[in-house]
Amino acid sequence: MDFDAHTSTMSQGITAESLTRAQKAAAILVAMGKPAAGRLLKFFSHEELKSLIEAARMLKTIPQGELEKIIAEFEDEFAEGAGLMDSAATMDKILSESLSPEEVSAIMNHGAETGGEAPLPVWPQIEKLEPERVGAFLEREHPQTAALVLTKLSSTTTANVLLAMPKQQRGEVAKRMVTMGTVKPGALRIVENQLRTALLGDSAKKSSSEGQARVATVLNELEKAQLDEILSDMETAGSQDVHAIRAQLFSFEDLPLLSQKARLALFDGLSPEIVTLALRNAGKELTETVLSALGVRSRRMIEAELSMEVDGLPAAEIAKARRAIATTAIRLSKDGKIELPSTQVAA
């Protein structure tokens, strides 16, 4: 091709001065060719690669003389290049032969769907799910979709999921796995999004519920003032789980909120020693609430104990007894024997 003749016929040629730095870099990479450019691309960040691709797609034709000026800016000893045509197609070809389809897809869609924050990878999360759950989901899908999903998982996970699927479907899915070719990034994203919604959405809810239960268990070990302080800090930090956590909390000070029937069931199995210790330094209202749930004999015995002053009783021992009573109430609630006033506690 006579590049001088070609460029001379252009009514409006691209000049080196009119190009951005990203466009100049894209032009040089295309001029270098696939092997050298491919090695260099590995050193660019996602955002830099995205800028290069977008810059290349803005280029139409670069006259040889202008390309030489661009090259001179980067490297004086750079070999003389030729005028570039269809830079976008050439850049796409370099990318496709240098990076995997998943890497190209990640570059061009990095942050686009989440306003700058890329979603967590799907496949490592699916690996953590029970094979039976994944198998139950895939048996409702087309065999080709099931085969695609299984080719993305580890061999161990894939084997377990296959075993969890109906016997009549295993052969068809395995056959399609053998012939599975390269999947277009767009199709793969559709499958990944479906998995996020159908499988990982429930998993995230379950994980959130488990996390709330863990935090509630920890907070139930604290005294009322400490518990309320941490919940207040969580609200200040913008936590959306405070209400759900409150519903799982119960402290000794919440005893007046229990129904009389629940209090009778609670104190029926507690030793008088623990109850007496827990009532040390308690207010009159709280003390009467507890005593009203005891039998006549137990009440008189505990009242007699409380009337006697005890010197040097560690506050930690009192707190421990109160936590024991609250823990018993929580256990009875989980067993369905009493109902905690969680909505009232939250108020």
Image (cartoon, rainbow, N blue to C red):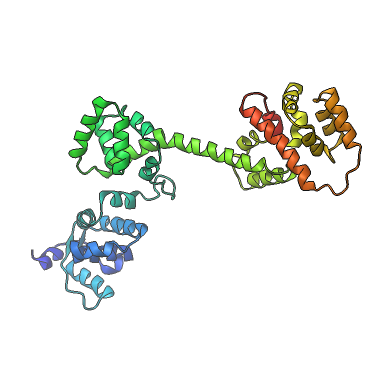
Quarter containing the N terminus: bottom left
Q: Residue at x 19, y 34 (%)?
A: 175
Q: Quadrant of residue 89 in the image?
A: bottom left
**Residue farthest bottom in this picture:** 76
In the image, is 177 to the left or to the right of 343? Answer: left
Q: Nearer the viewer, residue 161 or 303?
A: 303
Q: Residue at x 39, y 47 (%)?
A: 112
In the image, is 228 to the left or to the right of 29? Answer: right
Q: Position of residue 305 (x, y in %)?
A: 88, 36
Q: Position of residue 182 (x, y in %)?
A: 21, 44
Evaluate whether residue 221 shows in this view. Answer: yes
Quarter containing the C terminus: top right
**Residue farthest left in this picture:** 1
Q: Quadrant of residue 50 in the image?
A: bottom left
Q: Position of residue 147 (x, y in %)?
A: 25, 36
Q: Nearer the viewer, residue 300 or 129?
A: 300
